[in-house]
Amino acid sequence: MTVSAAGVLEGLRPYLWLALTAFLAGFLSYLAFGGAHGPLRSDAQYAPKVSAPAMDDWNLPKHI
């Protein structure tokens, strides 16, 4: 009994089509439902480099 490569390919063809269909469905749904999209806001949120009080009450004059 000899099995040719063409016979093996014919036997696997339905499974290959199923795998291709599943891959395409998953990949297209990934693209459609926002998996490949970037962040919604393009401007970056950074913390201020120097944090200081907004009023001058913290810097009272010194009396010696």
Image (cartoon, rainbow, N blue to C red):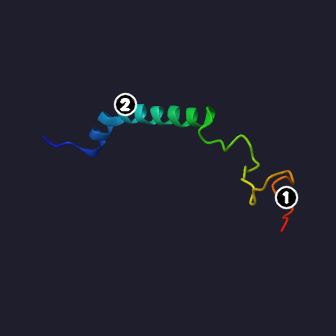
Q: Residues within 10 Å of mark 1 (few under 14, many from 20)?
A: few
Quadrant holding the C terminus:
bottom right
- Tell me where residue 8 sits by quadrant: top left
Horizontal side of residue 58 vs 46, given as left or right:
right
Name the amino acid type tagged 2. Pro
Dot 2 falls on a residue whose secondary structure is helix
Tell me how far mark 2 sits from mark 1, CA to CA: 82 Å
Residue closer to the observer: 60 or 3: 60
Q: Looking at the image, which residue is at 78% across and 56% down? A: 52
Horizontal side of residue 39 vs 25, given as left or right:
right
The residue labelled by disc 2 is 14
Name the amino acid type tagged 1. Leu
Residue 37: give x, y in percent of width and height. 65, 41
Horizontal side of residue 63 vs 29, given as left or right:
right
First-in-chain label (2 vs 1): 2
Q: Looking at the image, which residue is at 87% across and 54% down? A: 56
Residue closer to the observer: 31 or 15: 31
Q: Looking at the image, which residue is at 62% across and 33% down? A: 32
The residue labelled by disc 1 is 60
Quadrant holding the N terminus:
top left
